[in-house]
Amino acid sequence: MFNNIRVGFVSATSSIKRGNKKTLSFIIFVLALIFVNLVFLPSMIGGMTGMFNGFMQYPYGDIVIEPSMDNSYINNADDVLKKARAVPDVKAATKRLDVGASIQHKHKVVGSTITGLLPSEEYDVSNYPNIIAEGDFLGELSRDEIIIGAMLVEGYFGSEIYDNLGGIRVGSLVNVTYSNGVVRTYKVKGIMEGTFELVDLNALVHYKEIEDVYGLEESKATSVVIRVKNPDDSAKIKEKIIAAGVKEPVFTNTEKSDAILRQAMQSIDMINFVSNYVSLIVGAALILIIIYINVLNRKKEIGILKAVGISPGSIVISYAFISMFYVSSGILAGLILYFLLMFYFTVSPITFYETMTIIPEIQGGLVIKSIFTMLIMSVIAGVLPAWRVSKESILEAIWGR
Amino acid sequence: MKQESMINIKNLKRYYKSGQVITKALNGVSFEIKQGEFIAIMGASGSGKTTMLRILGLLDKPTKGDYTINNLDIVNLPEEERNYYRLTQLGYVFQDYALINEMSAIENIYILSLMEGKSKVQSIITAQAALDKVGLSDKSERIPDQLSGGEKQRIAVARAIAKHPKILFADEPCANLDTHNSEQILEVFKTLNKKFGQTIVMVTHESWHTKYVSRIIKLKDGKIVSDVKV
C-alpha cells in the first residue's frame, strides 16, 4: 500500500507539473464555477430569508410578548417589561398598542392598523425611527402627530396596488376614526417606508394617544417588543423570559415569521433544497465527466504504466491525487470568485420591487459542506474511471484491442 | 555442461475472434530459450511475432498451451502475481517507446524501483546507472518531448534494464529509428548480452539486425518455420 501511495504521488505530481497548463486552467475554472453554483444561490436565498426576517423585526422585534388567548391586552405591561428587562441578555424592550382605524384625507379613506408606541424607546427596539422617508419620527410630545406608511401615500411604491390617501405630504392633516368611534385629527409628521406591507400600510401615533382614545389604564399593551443582544440566542432568551415569570405567550421573531410567512418561507426553502440537490447532482456529474475524459485521454498511459509493472492500485491512487488537486484548486478559485461575488452584491445589492434589496448571506456551514462534498466527489470521480481503465487488459488500454 | 532452458513454450496458441471469424495468430508454437541467448523473432506482417512477444512478456494470455519461466507456470499465474512478476523479472521495450510524456527520463525509470519498494535515493541511483549504460546520463531531467527518437528508445531500454530483468523483450525497437539510431540501440543490446549475459528476445523484420543476435526464430502464419543459431 505504501509503495502504491508513493508511486501514485510521484505519477500525479509529474502529471500536474508537466501536464497541459491550458487544460489544467480550464478544468480548474469549470470546477470553480461548479463550486460557486453550489454556494451562490443558497447565499442569495439566505439573503432573501434574512430580508424577510428583517421585515418581521418591525412588528415583533427579536422576541414579542402578546396577550393570552382570552385577553385583548397584556394587563400591567409595565410589570411584564420590568421582568423582561431584568433578563441579562435583553438589550431593550417597549410596549405597543395596535388598534384598527380608518384614516381620511380629503375625500379619500383607507382602513389601517395604527400602532401606539413610545417614540424614545423605539430607537433601541425597532427600526421605525430609521425608515422615515419624509419628515421626522415622532417625539415624546407628538400627541397630535402621525406617521403614515408609504403605501398609503400616492406616489410611493405599492400605493398603486392598495387604496391610498392621495397626495398627502408632511404637514397634511388627516382624520382618524378609531374602532370605538372616536375621531381625532393629526398632522402628518413623517412618511415611513419599510418596503414591507406590514409596515407601509400602517400608521404610528404616540402610545398615550391610544390610551386616551380607548380610556385604557394600568399600562395595557397589545404587545411587548424585545430586542436582544444576540438574535441567534433568541430561543434561549425566550425561555429565560418565561422563567422570569412572564405568564403571557412569548414568541421569537422566527416563530412569528414561520406563522405569518410560512408559505412563502416554505416555498423559498423548497427552492433552496431543490437548488442545492440539483447543483450537487450537476456538480457531481460534471466532476465525473471532467475526470473521466481526463482518464480516457490518458488510457494509453495507464496501459503503459501497467505494462511496465506499476500496480493498478498505484494508478488509481495517482488519479485520486490528480482529481483531488483539480477539485481543491477549483474550490480555492471558487472561494475567491464566491467572495468577490458576495462583495459585489453586498456593495450593489439586487433590487426588486424598486425598493426591496437582497444582500447575500455568506453561509459558513454551507460553504464547508460544499467543500467536503466536492472533495468526496473528487475522490469518487477520480477513482471510479481510473479503476475501470486500470482493470482493462493492457492491450486494450494501450492499443485499443 | 548442458545449459538449462529458461523459457519453455509448448503448443502455444492464440486465437482472436471477431464476429464469426477466428484468426489464428499463433497456432501451436513450441520452443525453449536458454539463459544468455539473444533471439530474434522474425516473420512477415501477420505472422504472429508480436503476439508471441506479448505473451512472452506477460502482456497477453495464450488461448491454449504451456508457458513456463524457470519452471514457473506463467499461464495460470494470478493477475496480481503476473503484474509483480512483470515488474521484478521482465523488461519490455516497445516499438513506440511507451514513455510517460509528463515524466522526466529519470522519473520514467525510477518509478519502477519505487514500486518495488526501494527508497527514492536508491531508486534514483539505480535509474542513473541504467542511464549510464545507454549513454544518456546527461539527459536524465529531460522529458520525452525534449529527446530524439533514438534517445527516447534508449531511455525505454534503460527503463527495461534498470531492474536487471531475467529476460528483456523488445518489440521492433528500431522500427521508428534511422539506421544510425538503430545501430546504437542494437549495440546496447549486444553489450548487455555479451557483457552482462542478459537474455534478450527481440522481434524484428530487418534482416541486417540478425548480425547482432545468437539465434533466429522465423514465424509464418502463426507457426515456427525455422529456428537457427547464428
Image: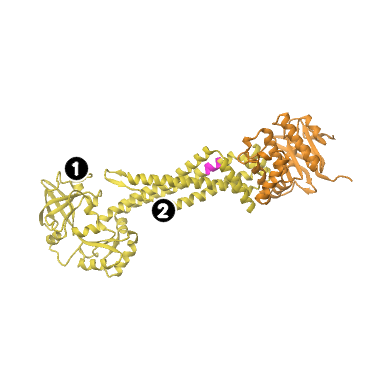
Chain colours: A yellow, B orange
- Pointer 2: residues within 10 angstroms few (<14), some, or many (20+)? few
Quadrant of the image occupied by residue A228: bottom left
Position of residue B203 in the picture relative to residue A31 (left or right)? right
Q: Residue furthest front?
A: B138
What range of the chain is rendered magenta? A288-293
Up the image or down, A209 lies above or below B132; here it is: below
Residue A117 visible (yes or no):
no
Inspect the magenta stretch and tell me whether residue A330 lies in it.
Answer: no
The spot of residue B95 in percent (x, y) is: 70, 35
Up the image or down, A133 lies above or below A205; here it is: above
Position of residue B207 in the picture relative to residue A306 (left or right)? right
Label annotation for residue A155 = 1
Element class at badge 1: loop
Q: Quadrant of the C terminus of chain A?
A: top right
Q: Chain of mark 1?
A: A
From the image, tell me which residue sits under label 2: A364
What residue type is disc 1 on?
Answer: Gly
The spot of residue A248 in percent (x, y) is: 26, 66
Q: Chain of mark 2?
A: A
Position of residue B41 in the picture relative to residue A93 (left or right)? right
Towards the viewer: A366 or B202? B202
Quadrant of the image occupied by residue B41: top right
Label annotation for residue A177 = none
Element class at badge 2: helix
Which numbered disc, 2 or 1, marks the residue closer to the eye? Answer: 2
Residues behind callouts 2 and 1 on a single chain = yes
Residue drawn at x 22%, y 57% is: A123
What residue type is disc 2 on?
Answer: Gly
